[in-house]
Amino acid sequence: MSKITSSSTAEYFAKNLQQVGFSSPSKAVLTTLKESVDNSLDACEEAGILPQLEVEISKLGPGHTRNTDLVQISVEDNGPGLDPEELAKVFGEYLASSKFGRGRCSRGQQGIGISAATTWAQLTNASGVRVISKTKNMRKAVTAIIDVDIKGNRGIVKKKETIDWDKSHGLKVEFRIDGRIVLNGDGGLLTYLEGTTLVNPHLSMNYKMTDQDMVKIERVANEVPEIPPATLPHPHTMKLGEFMTHAGLFGKISLENFFKKGFSRVSDTAIKDIAKKIPKGLMSKNLMTIKEEDFKKIYSAMHEITLIAPSTRSVLTVGEEGLSKSIMRLGEVDFFSVVTRKPTICDFKPVVVEVAIARFLDRSQPDGSESQAQLLRFANRVPLQFDKGACAITRAIETVNWRSYGLNQPKDSVPMGPFVFAISVTSPFIKFKNASKETIDGGDDLIEEIRRALMQAGQKMSRHIRAEGKAADLERKISHMEKFGPILVEGLARIVGAGKGRVAKAEEGLKKLLGRDASSAERELDDATSRLSALKTRERKKFGLEEEVEAAADDEGAPSEEAVIEHEEAVADDAVPVEAKGKGTKKKAEAPPATTRKKK
Amino acid sequence: MSSHKHIRVRESTKDIPKEAKLLCDQMLSDLEKAKRPVLEAVKCALDNSFYNPKVGFLTPGKKVVKTELNVSSVQKMARTIFLLEMLLRNVASGAVNTKRELYYMAKGIIKKDPSKRPLDFDDQPESDSIIDFIGDMLQVYREEMNCFANDRGGQTYSKNLVVTETLPDGSKAVVDLGSLGTTPFQPKNKPQTFRLKPKKGKIDFCLVIESEGTANTLVANGMHKRHNCIILGAQGVPSNGVRGWCKTIQDQLRVPMFFYGDLDAYTLQNIFRTLKAGSAASLIRNSDFSAPDVKFLGVLPDDVTKYDLNYYTVNERDAVENRSLKKAKDALENDPFFRDKKNADLADILHWLVKEKKRCEQQAVFSVDPDDPLILEKIIVEKIKRKSYV
């Protein structure tokens, strides 16, 4: 029998980096960028800082591995920075995280991503990540290279020194890895940055990709989204083993108190109902003395009773206002529609779904042909860029009948046209299909919730498309009259042998007849247009966009005037009122506290 | 161009140029009064079809398709008048054309006259539907407007049939089918004036075979020499030429006529029903293009058992086969021909097809005795003798 050995977590991941997003040279670059940016954004949010990111990706030469380039990825933020003694843990140790299992809507969850990026850099370029860090309490910044001690799963700090840095606080990471730069397409770096821009209205970012010009993105929201506090677990989301482990954390308290203190949504009535279903006296018994078979009885009883659904207060939304403003940063928007659903419970987990659909003027094909609309998927505000077909979001979009909203859609597919569909699912407990977090695994409940959000957005958007249809209809009718009327009269006159007098009279009559049709088409168009513009005015007032849109119109002319927000009363009931969301879920940017930077 | 002006298809009292002129005059005067002209055509659809067993074919009901002038219909109306003018010119001059030729002629006229460019047709179905609409509107056959289809099907063999054709110029052509050797006689898909006579005595029966190939096999094996009969191949859904020819045989020779084809819903509905009672799409012409006395000789459901014929089970997952099954159910519910008591036996076959989900091809009979090349002939004759037909 061969000898059984145990290996460290770092050893496991070093051998299985493909499981966490390093399966190809191009994915390695994207994942490294993604992990760095996600960490920066999470850290800024934790500290209540409006993020300002500087991103640069450059090709330094050929890579050490065949068919790769040596790529430098550098991400600099204005976050709280990390204390020097934390650098090794954050960048060099796997599963060292401040967020693991906390039940919060942060981007990172387990503490794998950035350590995996360091490992990749180390494996392909024999050097880990170069970090510069400064907290507001430090006079000078610290710079160091962090490697992963793969055998021991811990970080090793090398070449540590203090330097001057013209920032009051912040962090800069610089990875040199073997990879390949892919800018566009589903798995492209620009697609990632575009998606991140969309769902982070409060983000300002300058980025430079290889030899392209620097792109500056200004923030459109001046509030840092507050990550709602974690809530206690709901009993119905627990498996038996989890339930018993959870009990172990509470020590010598009675079962009744355990239910009250250890869970959310367990009322006194619920405790009485559970007590009726378990042996007498068990409810007041000390947790430490309860036997395993009694735990099983308690667990079954707990699942038999009806409880209030879990709280949805722990989920975070970008909000319609933020999405509305943010979407205009992606290009020249013709029109768009955004929906933020009320937080709800899917598969016993609180979830909120947000949808933004926009039509872009600059994405139309020159020959008028249509390609598939771009689909941007997000989970906890992180773009999902691979394995689209297996994702719950894709399944939801494919099952909506977009033709009824005026879009072209091949059977059971993503619709066609110069549209961007952005769908964001936020939940403290998102079920991913794999550790690299590329696809959401969704049950029927979640798919239905996404479908509803998509359909609401579709309804809003269809009003624009309808108005366009009426305008096209009027144009077609007018051109039809001019084209076919005279030919008809001439043909009739030739067959009948009628003279000029009759022809003139008939043409006169025809004009009257078709004029009536045109006026009725004009009336329909006027009606559709005025309904739409009334709506636009209402929405501009609501989102406080009026001045901005007008200012943009002054700068750029007509198209920006058209860039409007759509909203429909019919669906307003289901959507979260924007004004209401402003309170409680957002907090003003404040001076960065000297908090510890959290890592994934 | 020939000297005759108007080829007569039937005993019609319609003066097409006059009727067309009246219609156009009405439209023009409506326009002068700023009133919307309306074009009306018989609705040629199953929901406007009626079947009276005494009449024997599908006749139109009162439903009409009305096209009122408005911005949406102005294009169709302008195209209708444009093609009507072309057809009237043909009627006046005696020129004949196919639908495809008319399509290209229309394109030629449009090319020469830029003012007509908006009327241009993108493809032939667009002009075809306008030609059909004109026919339905004036209640005339398109042949009466000198627009003819390609000849298809109807290759006829007999040793005892003489056809005398009166040509448009009044001269007569006599064709003795028994003297044509291996060449068949074929009716044209345009009006012809025939006088049919047996060479001697009375012809025993006329056999219409769905497959032209199987009809040729019977003839090659000499069936028409051994039996005093007429054999003709329908070549699938019978063309107007075949339908008119069968009616002529039925009316003039008064011989029993049998149809032999596949046992499936398509054959029964689209081929046999069209031959016997016409179709919903050609309601205005069924009176001249149906042979109500024709009997369905086979393949009958009983034959499948009696001769142990190979059959196929309808694959319900196959869209085409499943559609045919649905069509059969639909026919039982909505087709006045199959709903009529007189045709209950034919409806029973459809019921059997729907229930058993089986189909059997006409050639399956060759499996009964592969060594006997005359097996089909023998079975057909035997079935006629024992009156095994519906």
Image: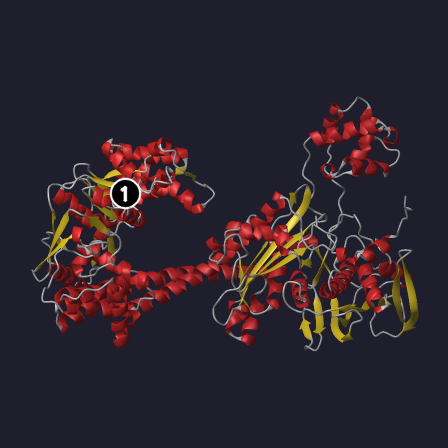
What x and y, as percent, mark residue A318? 66, 57
Q: Chain of mark 1?
A: B
A40 to the left or right of B345: right
In the rendered image, which quarter contains the N terminus of chain A?
top right
Q: Amino acid at mark 1?
A: Phe
> In the image shown, does A124 or B216 lie closer to the viewer?
B216
At 72% from the left edge and 64% from the top edge, which residue is drawn? A30
Q: Secondary structure at mark 1?
A: helix
> Is residue B144 something one can see in this rendering?
yes
Instruction: List x then y, in percent, for residue B104.
Output: 28, 68
Q: Is residue B389 visible?
A: no
Residue A294, placed above or below residue B15: above
| B35 shown above or below B160 | below
Compared across the picture, whether A578 is left or right of A172 comes to left
Q: Residue at x 16, y 40 (%)?
A: B255
- Residue at x-position 83% and y-position 58%: A14
Answer with the quarter of the image where residue B310 lies: top left
Q: Is residue A358 above or below residue A404?
A: below
Residue B147: x and y in percent read 21, 61
Callout count: 1
> Residue placed farthest to the top in the image?
A280
Q: Is B206 in front, or is A235?
A: B206
Colour scheme of the picture: secondary structure
Other residues around mark 1 within 10 Å, as few (<14) / some (14–19) / many (≥20) = many
Left or right: B102 in relation to B328: left
The residue at which mark 1 appears reads as B272
Could you tell me which quadrant the C terminus of chain A lies in? bottom right
Residue closest to the eye, A21 or A132: A21
Residue B252 lies in quadrant: top left
Residue A250 drawn at (x, y percent): 85, 37
B270 vs A433, nearest the viewer: B270
Farthest residue toward the front? B371
